[in-house]
Amino acid sequence: MTLSFAQINAKQVQVMKLIKKTILITGGTSGIGMELADQLLQRGNTVIVTGRDIAKLETAQRKLPGLQAFQSDASDPNAIAKLYASVIEHFPDLDVLINNAGIMRNLNINGARDLNDVTREIEVNLSGPVRMVQQFLPHLKAREGALIVNVSSGLAFIPMAMSPVYCATKAALHSFTQCLRVQLEGTGVTVVELAPPGVETPLFRGEFAEEMKGQKGMDVTVLVKAAIAGIEAGKIEIRPGLSNVLKIMSRVAPQFMFKQLAKVGKQDPQPTLRAAR
Ligand SMILES: NC(=O)c1ccc[n+]([C@@H]2O[C@H](COP(=O)([O-])OP(=O)(O)OC[C@H]3O[C@@H](n4cnc5c(N)ncnc54)[C@H](OP(=O)(O)O)[C@@H]3O)[C@@H](O)[C@H]2O)c1
């Protein structure tokens, strides 16, 4: 039987237990990636993380005994090819890929910007996962019960004007993930999108210290628990907290919500919209 797009996207995937898996997480030395690594290790999985900064990788390994780590830049195609060779050599049982590495900038397009720098988010947040999937897919297809998780954002559904390129990458990653799910139907590879709301991580605080002053994102432990529970419950699009609100509002009142988000950083936004990242 051929399923329609709507049926595939609404369908609950086969129930999967995240135990005794071999899991690769890009950007696993901080924030959501590191918390995923921690909780997945505690459940008896083999967990491998990547990141660019060797010192952060070493610190993560000291904090999380048993954690495996590779230095790799998700925006560099050659680094992805090398990562693939190393990971598959040392961990041939790899069956889960979590595309988590990402950057988010407060970027004013209405000002001078280096032409190479202005698209930086695209290379990391969009080209990174697309290339990782392309590189690892033949291996994953050969594994039983394989899983790809792409970490997008609630801002995939409604953009926040303060971060135009970031939001474009997350909307594009959402779109790519939907298409990938359709294309992989019948291969045995499950495709899940995790769209977090604002979460208390260095990304949330770093670039937006001023704008997010006095505001509270979701606790990273809570977010990751919801992500794991969602995957195990067979959800294909996991939208904790405000991300679900953004998804609903993108259907019922997109312009209203877009204007509300455009106020972030300009004036005091409504409390319910504050952490809608
Ligand atoms: N926090 C939020 O509010 C929020 C909300 C929605 C979605 N998200 C998404 O969740 C993901 C994780 O965000 P986070 O808040 O946990 O960020 P974070 O705390 O800043 O951590 C980002 C991680 O990605 C790594 N990374 C960055 N650029 C990389 C690259 N080019 N190649 C490989 N690794 C790279 C970082 O390590 P190195 O710097 O050493 O490379 C770090 O380990 C991102 O995709 C983000 O867009 C976050």
Image: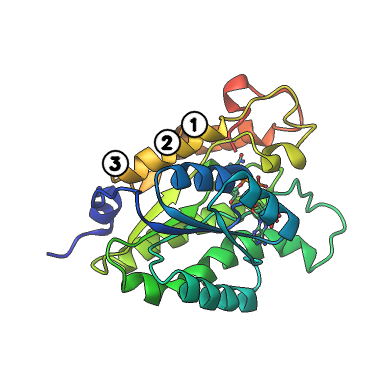
Give the camera-side residue of 74 and 255. Answer: 74
Between the C-alphas of marks 3 and 1, the distance is: 16 Å
Residue 48 shown left or right of residue 211 in the figure: left
What x and y, as percent, mark residue 208? Answer: 75, 38
Residue beneath the point at 56% across and 53% down: 170
Instruction: Residue type at mark 3: give it.
Output: Ala
Mark 2 or mark 3, earlier in chain: 2
How many numbered discs sit on the rendered protein? 3
Q: Secondary structure at mark 1?
A: helix
- In the rendering, which numbered label is found on residue 226? 2
| Residue at (38, 46) in percent of width and height | 237
For residue 233, the mark is 3
The residue at the point 69 percent across, 47 percent down is 163
Residue 147: x, y in percent?
36, 59
Residue 250: image x %, image y %? 47, 39
Local packing at callout 3 (Cα closer than 10 Å; few below 14, some 14-19, many 20+) is: some
**Amino acid type, label 1:** Val
The verdict on label 1 being within 8 Å of ligand 1 is no
The mark that comes first in sequence, 3 or 1, is 1
- Circle 1 is placed at which residue position? 222
Q: CA distance from mark 2 to mark 3?
A: 10 Å
Mark 2 secondary-structure assignment: helix
Regarding residue 239, the answer to whether it shows in the image is: no
Provide residue 71's location: percent of width, then percent of height. Answer: 66, 65
| Classed neighbour count for the residue bearing mark 2: other residues with Cα under 10 Å, few (<14), some (14–19), many (≥20) | some
Tell me, yes or no, whether the two marked residues, 2 and 1, touch with CB atoms within 8 Å: yes
Task: Please tell me whether mark 3 sits on a helix, a strand or a loop.
Answer: loop
